[in-house]
């Protein structure tokens, strides 16, 4: 599929394949009845690392979309302190919580103080001690990191089709505020508020995928199981008649860059897929020779007509 593009700037939506962009921008896109959680569509397609990553950068590829995560630094009140690359289940849950709060309040500024405790409790996780310290550390790493998305875009120029390599800055946070705790040997930061970039806030409002809170709680033990669930929630309702076959090579590229060999990846993917399917029983998946077959399935949360609210005009 080709697209005409003039001089308009690219957005986070352009990191998605064209057919996904069109579906995500439909006026009657998926929204949930009740109180769902949300995650932007592009983060359902390419995810953060699932285990500690050596070095300062990490890359993941899914189809025509590539994600690069680069570790950054956070100011602790005295100096900028290097942070690791965010990894594992905590930053994923943090992104879900932040996206959900942004939609609930219709605001790019999210209170992450008391709301994080409530969110952890909702998931059945300990909201104090080790669990909160881990969430705090991963949220700080997430605030510090830079995200870049890359894709090949086909454009028609003067009647000729040409491919362009596009790099997009996808940093989610514009501002990160934290209370400085000087009670210990070294100052520590307690996140209080996050302001999203305009681009990330727009991506949340226009492409957010509704997710079942109960499913997140059920899968909060495994980053891979959660990645598979959010991918299926984003993907399955768009599968056309006849299904969509995904090869093991493509699945490993998307979900298993941490594995050198195919066999251990397949064993782990099958295990976590079964767990994801228990949280999403409507999903129609079958293993076929060389990969898996996705069949058109209802989304985990029923679709209804969307009511898209305009942002309030700033006060003069």
Image (cartoon, rainbow, N blue to C red):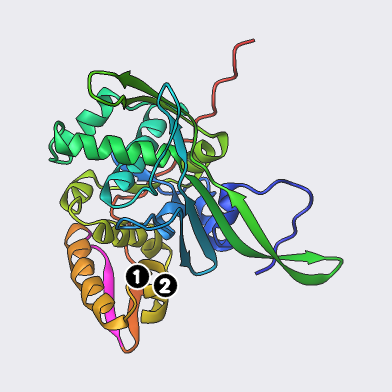
Residue drawn at x 43%, y 47% as measured from the top left: 40
**Distance CA(mark 1)–CA(mark 2):** 6 Å
Whether tag 1 and tag 2 are in contact, CB under 8 A, the answer is: yes
From the viewer's side, name the closer residue of 297 and 146: 146
The residue wearing badge 1 is 256
Say whether residue 253 is left or right of residue 283.
Answer: right
Dot 1 crowding, Cα within 10 Å, few <14, some 14–19, many 20+:
many
In the rendered image, the residue lying farthest to the bottom is 289
Residue 279 occupies quadrant = bottom left
Q: Quadrant of the N terminus?
A: bottom right
Please name the residue shown 26% across and 31% down the image: 116
Name the outermost residue toward the right.
Answer: 158
Q: Is residue 95 above or below residue 156?
A: above
* Residue 221 at x, y percent in the picture: 17, 53
Say whether residue 190 is left or right of residue 164: left
Corner quadrant of residue 312: top right
Residue at figure coordinates x 44%, y 71% from the top left: 240
| Residue at image coords 20%, 29% | 118
Q: In this view of the protein, can residue 273 be seen by the observer?
A: yes
Q: Nearer the viewer, residue 146 or 210?
A: 146
Secondary structure of the residue carrying numbered label 1: loop
Crowdedness near tag 2: few (<14), some (14–19) or many (≥20) residues, C-alpha within 10 Å: some
Work out whether residue 208 or residue 237 is closer to the camera in this orientation and state it: 208
**Tag 2's secondary structure?**
helix
- Magenta residue span: 280-288
* Residue 32 magenta: no
Does residue 34 appear in the picture of this structure? Answer: no
Residue 194, percent from left and from top: 42, 28
Q: Is residue 20 left or right of residue 82?
A: right
Specify the label residue 253 is tagged with.
2
Q: Is residue 251 toward the left or the right of residue 72 in the image?
A: left
Based on the picture, tell me whether residue 282 belongs to the magenta stretch: yes
């Amino acid at each position: 599929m080709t697209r005409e593009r003039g001089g308009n700037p690219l957005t986070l939506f352009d990191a998605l394949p064209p057919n996904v962009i069109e579906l995500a921008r439909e006026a009657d896109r998926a929204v949930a009845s009740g109180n769902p959680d949300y995650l932007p569509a592009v983060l359902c397609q390419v995810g953060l690392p699932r285990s500690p990553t050596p070095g300062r950068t990490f890359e993941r590829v899914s189809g025509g979309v590539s994600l690069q995560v680069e570790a950054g630094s956070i100011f602790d009140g005295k100096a900028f302190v290097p942070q690791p690359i965010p990894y594992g289940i905590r930053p994923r849950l943090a992104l879900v919580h932040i996206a959900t709060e942004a939609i609930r309040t219709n605001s790019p500024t999210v209170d992450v103080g008391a709301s994080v405790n409530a969110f952890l409790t909702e998931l059945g996780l300990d909201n104090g001690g080790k669990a909160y310290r881990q969430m705090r550390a991963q949220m700080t790493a997430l605030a510090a990191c830079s995200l870049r998305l890359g894709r090949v875009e086909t454009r028609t120029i003067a009647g000729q089709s040409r491919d362009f390599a596009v790099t997009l800055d996808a940093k989610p946070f514009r501002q990160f505020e934290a209370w400085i705790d000087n009670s210990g040997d070294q100052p520590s930061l307690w996140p209080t508020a996050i302001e999203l970039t305009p681009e990330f806030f727009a991506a949340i409002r226009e492409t957010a995928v509704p997710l079942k809170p109960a499913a997140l709680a059920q899968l909060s033990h495994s980053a891979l199981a959660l990645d598979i669930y959010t991918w299926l929630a984003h993907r399955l309702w768009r599968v056309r008649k006849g299904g969509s076959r995904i090869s093991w090579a493509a699945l490993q590229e998307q979900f298993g860059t941490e594995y050198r060999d195919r066999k251990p990846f397949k064993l782990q993917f099958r295990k976590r897929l079964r767990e994801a399917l228990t949280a999403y029983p409507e999903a129609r998946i079958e293993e076929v020779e060389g990969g898996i077959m996705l069949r058109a399935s209802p989304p985990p949360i029923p679709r209804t007509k969307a009511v898209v609210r305009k942002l309030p005009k700033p006060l003069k």
